[in-house]
Image (spheres, rainbow, N blue to C red):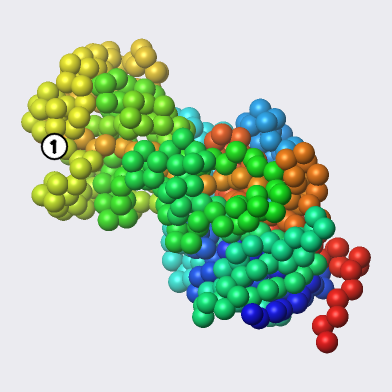
Amino acid sequence: MKQLQTDVVVVAAGLSGLAASIAAAENGANVITLEKSTTTGGAANMGMGPLGVGSSIQKNQMISLTPGEAFRKHMYFTHYRVDARLVRDYYFKSGSTIDWLMDMGVEFVGVQRAFSAPEATRAYSDGEFTWHVVKPLDGGVPGPRAATAMIKKMTERAVELGVEILYETPGKKIIMEDGKAVGVMAVDKNGEDVEIRANSVIVCTGGFGDNPQMIKDETEFEYAKTIYNFAVPGMKGDGIKMCWEAGAGKEQPIMELMYQLPDNMNHFILDGAFRQPCLWVNRNGNRFMPEDQIANTTFTGNAIATQPGKVAFSIFDSKMLKKYKKKGPDIVSHVHPHDLFDHFDEQWNRDIENGYEPVTQADTIEELAEKAGIDVDGLVAQVEEYNEMCEAGFDEIFEKDRVYMTPIEKGPFYCCKQYVGAYGSLGGVKINHKTQVLTQEAKVIPGLYAAGTDACNIFGDSYPFILSGNTMGFCLNSGRIAGENAASELADEEWDYD
């Protein structure tokens, strides 16, 4: 068995782990960081950028939102059912964290709301300019994976500071002595046990999005049946379980909801093409929300999760498809290509031919309902009611913006079954505003910290799109807070490195 000794051991080198490692090293600590993968960044490599409030970028763009305002908006959104002191400290640190990243060489293309949405898209009309989008490595248009450039700079900074990153070496157990965390047991790529003794342990393993059993045990969903979340390899909930085994209190974890298609990356054109304010129904054929708000993926995911079977159906007719092909989509996503409908026929025909289950085409509403698995009488009645409201120019049920009130009347008809999705899990480990891990009775477990999505218990039941970039923002700032606090404890301990 290998035996190592350091000041701070960080479990995982994702976004929060890198932030913790850098912060601890900048404050004089010797740091060993464990990473089960061959690369750093984890799920953050899929993202676009973090939240910040009070950054130099915002000041230069004359954005006047203050950390105090952001704190209050967040707490009102969550109805004060989350740790106010933790939320407060996070927002008040977030602006300086953006500048901290810029000092490392991270470049941002600017700051924006979640979507560049018109006011009619009410779900985003009150969003703040908090999302700092990273400039991609190739300097091109920002999109998914733009944050890889940030991960690269952070990894370089960690190495420059002397952080020792042990790749393919997952943490397995927190070493506890007399109620204090004093290190971590790990296993290297050759299967050899590694014991790392340290003054402090910081756990940042990114949740359990890649653990179907844990999703089933800890949430209301079942992977590949009632939820199709991103399953970033390695996100098994290791750190959460390690903390619980060490005596950590449990905060009920949730899934960071959105909606998407099964195997969506191989059906990406359709995944985006049907995210339009056409007609949305449940399997009984009934509308369940104003379709002009479907761009808020969290709220739509919530809504789908409450429908029978946790599914919904997005429907448009050939006349609408013709309009989309000519003028483009009604709602333009920052994630999907803007020329979706230029490629629609190719993707649609291939998926129909291959029998891709979520998609259905038919010449009549009755046939569409039967093939898609929607109640026939229910859908026929709903389409009739909806078309009457379209003709009248007003949605009497949900007050959907009249600009999107287009009847469903000309076949063939196109239908796509929508499922609950998620970016991964959120929360589970109980922490305080210093990111110290707490027992169920809210007592500090000395030497043990948790950061990132393992401990992101601050959203309540829904991601706050009013302050976009929040998950990456929390990962960065909670990691930075953990690293600084872990390093500050070194004055109380002396270590012999001879």
Q: Along the line of sight, which residue is nearer the eye, 255 or 408? A: 255
> Which quadrant holds the N terminus?
bottom right
**Which residue is at a point 57% across and 73% down the rendered structure image?**
187
The answer to which image quadrant residue 175 occupies is: bottom right
**Which residue is at a point 17% across and 20% down the rendered structure image?**
376
Spot occupied by residue 164 in the image (x, y as percentages of width and height):
66, 78
Spot occupied by residue 197 in the image (x, y as percentages of width and height):
75, 72
Q: Along the line of sight, which residue is nearer the eye, 306 or 365? A: 306
Q: Is residue 450 left or right of residue 296?
A: right
Camera sees residue 287? yes
Camera sees residue 24? no
Tally of numbered discs:
1
Q: Residue furthest left?
A: 363
Vertical side of 4 occupied by 17: above or below = above
Spot occupied by residue 64 in the image (x, y as percentages of width and height):
70, 43
Q: Which residue is mark 1?
A: 361
